[in-house]
Image: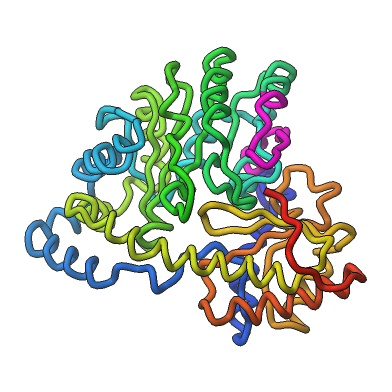
Amino acid sequence: MPEFATRMEGITGSAIRAVFKLLAKGDIISFGGGNPSAESFPTEEIRSIVDSLLARDGANLLQYGPTEGYAPLRRAIAQHILAPKCVHVAEEQILPLTGSMQGFDLLCRVFVNRGDTVLVEAPTFLGVLQTLNLYGAKLVSVPSDEEGVCVDALESLVRKHRPKLFYCIPTFQNPSGRTIGIERRKRIARIAAEYDLLVAEDDPYCDLRYSGVPLPPIKAFDESGTVLLFNSFSKIIAPGLRVGSVTAEAPVIRKMTIAKQSADTHSPNLTQAIVAEFLSRGLLPQQLARILPMYGERMNAMLAAMDAYFPESCAYTRPEGGLFIWGELPGGDMATLVGRAADECGVAFIPGFHFFADPAGQEGTFRLNFSGTAFENIEPGIRRLGALFTEAAGAPLRLPCKAVQ
């Protein structure tokens, strides 16, 4: 067999994909993935939309389409997704994507040369870490606290490294669940303008808020055109549609469109049209009204169980939304405990070190997902995991939790 390309050296499979292999065994309670609940999918609404679309315009929707995307979707995103968040753009500033992850691949194709410095949050989404590593980026981590990324450290690292790009998830971050406050968002936009820094703002969880006040995206404060905003319909409608979008200045969108031509020609017309019709019919507000209480209930059930069963030394976040809870068990070895959890407890989770560009010192961190597990499985799953963590910590159970924010 011929040798693999050098860019594949050191590239490993996703820890999240490994969870799906565990689930194939059956009888596993999974807190490991990031799946929305199957109960959240608007199946009947989508069935009605598909029937209507095919009857009305089936021949065109089943044909090839423009790389720039389905025009009604671009308009619907501008009107129903961006404008309510104080982001006002023209249609040509929006590129529909085959899932928002495609957007990060296109972004790297257009902007990232091998050896370019890219700043990422610590921790951050491991899928984007994989993509950046594939393109040979030099990754530098920006520390975070209870209010998300530390902007003083960000500016210092920008001055020191002159990076090409900063990638962040400002709202209900994956994996930490933390949210960057509004003043920090404004300052990130100012830093981007001052240093000509591209900011890739990944915002798939912003509508999954169970308490607190919604915040505008960083893009809303972008006066220099250096912020690219990535949105996704995977968590709020259905991931199988594979529809996302990127919003940026028109010249950037044109370059990303050229890169997309060689990737997949265009995103599927039919799924783009489904999302466009879903938005245009005004179905998103009722969809959110249906799923937010369900997810909020699951998050609260998980936190209550963690309060009851996790050892006192274990600290974890209490998010206002999103899909994840982030924790740390001091002295814990999650690389070992993840296997024991699956084999001895029938529970899956993700060790936190996977989410760091530099995983040194992160052996005790972990991420739990509450959206993809049935409500009735949360308490028993956390009880089993708590017993394992308590044994590992050599400490008694505790109530209440001493949590980090």
Query: Magenta includes 14?
Result: no
Which residue ends up furthest to the bottom in the rendered image?
27
Which residue ends up furthest to the right in the rendered image?
394
Task: Determine whether, in the image, residue 208 is placed left or right of residue 67.
Answer: right
Q: Could you say which is closer to the camera, residue 126 or residue 383?
A: 383
Task: Determine whether, in the image, residue 396 is placed left or right of residue 103.
Answer: right
Query: Magenta includes 141?
Result: yes
Q: Residue at x 65, y 31 (%)?
A: 118
Q: Position of residue 262 (x, y in %)?
A: 40, 41
In this picture, is 141 found above or below 160? below
Q: Position of residue 80 (x, y in %)?
A: 26, 43
Task: Determine whether, in the image, residue 18 is placed left or right of residue 102.
Answer: right
Q: Could you say which is closer to the camera, residue 34 or residue 318?
A: 318
In this picture, is 277 found above or below 27? above
In this figure, which colouring scheme has been used for the structure?
A: rainbow
Q: Residue at x 60, y 76 (%)?
A: 378
Can residue 116 be seen by looking at this rendering? no
Which residue ends up furthest to the top in the rendered image?
194
Q: Which residues are magenta?
A: 133-154
Please give the count of numbered marks on the rendered protein.
0
Q: Residue at x 29, y 35 (%)?
A: 83
Quadrant housing residue 146? top right
Quadrant housing residue 134? top right
Quadrant in the picture for the N terminus: bottom right
Q: Residue at x 62, y 63 (%)?
A: 16
Can residue 357 be seen by looking at this rendering? yes
Q: Position of residue 103 (x, y in %)?
A: 45, 42
Quadrant housing residue 113? top right
In this picture, is 242 found above or below 304? above
